[in-house]
Amino acid sequence: MSTESATQPFDHPALFYRGEQEYLAGTVPFVEEALAAGDPVAVAVPGANLALIRAALGGQAARVRLLDMERAGRNPGRIIPRVLRAFAEGHPGRRARILGESIWAGRTAVEYPACVQHEALTNVAFQGRAATIRCLYDAARLAESVLADAYVTHPTVIDSGTRADSAAYAPQELLARYNQPLSAPPDTPATAYTATSLGEVRHVATRSAAASGLRTPRLDDFELAVAELTTNSVVHGGGRGTLRVWADDRHVICEVQDAGLIDDPLAGRRLPPREQHGGRGLLLVNVVADLVRTYSAPDRGTTTRVYFRR
């Protein structure tokens, strides 16, 4: 089984596995080949699977960047900047090899659209870059629709040890398909804001989150996200917007709506140059939130919904 394409600098296959034996067969040789070639290698998978790979590698595990994706990638929007690109750009001039598992059986229906958008955008973020990112899918536990989407977001698929090109590969079409209006919020009052009321609306939102059970330091992160989103509305979204805050069984949720349009597919996932001033607001939101969902259309403006676990 070839680990990377001989013709493309960026190699992004999906690997379907069924059970522990296939999982290790699709991951451990990948890591060992990278180490033998002297390439930097990272493994970012859910904790239980990370333990399997660590045990199978033995002493070689110390030479691998190991990340629990349930923590590092809880919000799919931060996987590209804080996991994939951070690792690749930490090894300039070398081919980074990464095992990633951003979609697992425990992901919720609310999280899934953000997960599949992440997979599609990985192709954009690494276009022309020398890197191999192999994405793992539990074919025994994930829904058939999830596996079908993997064919759309990956140019090649490895299944039962056989690698083949995907005739369904069309990541841009998938991005359009999943850019859909978010579910209706509960009957929660909306607070309008402009440039002169940014401080007031931030305090209103933070008080509501605290009343719903969010505590410091997560409350501080929530306040930061609200500040960045509402400021972005004023600067890029027509100078005004509306905000709602509510809670469900697991999260405190903030929704910001404005008249702006997000036309950069990597907005919030792009690492700006160190010397650049500004341009980090949406990235910070992705870093601190547990989930970010966005809908943006020319005739509907932009709705951004951020989730913080209580």
Image (cartoon, rainbow, N blue to C red):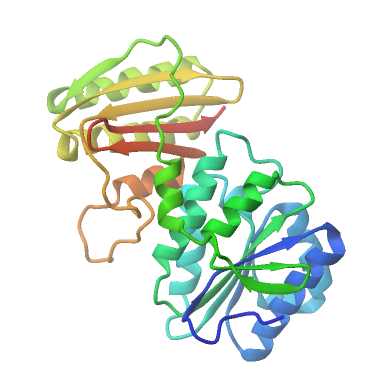
Location of the N terminus (image quadrant)? bottom right
Q: Residue at x 50, y 32 (%)?
A: 308
Q: Which residue of the protein is positioned furthest toward the bottom in this rendering?
A: 37
Where residue 249 appears, x then y in whole percent?
A: 61, 20
Q: Nearer the viewer, residue 293 or 277?
A: 293
Q: Residue at x 51, y 16 (%)?
A: 212
Q: Is residue 241 left or right of residue 81?
A: left
Q: Nearer the viewer, residue 123 or 44?
A: 123
Q: Which residue of the protein is positioned furthest toward the front in this rendering?
A: 167
Q: Is residue 48 left or right of residue 153?
A: right
Q: How many marks?
A: 0
Q: Is residue 117 above or below residue 32?
A: above
Q: Is residue 195 above or below residue 82?
A: above
Q: Residue at x 64, y 57 (%)?
A: 101
Where residue 139 appears, x then y in whole percent?
A: 75, 54
Q: Nearer the viewer, residue 156 or 35?
A: 156
Location of the C terminus (image quadrant)? top right
The quadrant where residue 45 appears: bottom right
Q: Is residue 95 above or below residue 226?
A: below
Q: Residue at x 81, y 58 (%)?
A: 18
Q: Nearer the viewer, residue 150 or 284?
A: 150
Where residue 48 appears, x then y in whole percent?
A: 77, 53
The quadrant where residue 4 appears: bottom right
Q: Is residue 69 left or right of residue 299?
A: right
Where residue 71 appears, x then y in whole percent?
A: 61, 49
Q: Is residue 165 left or right of residue 288?
A: right
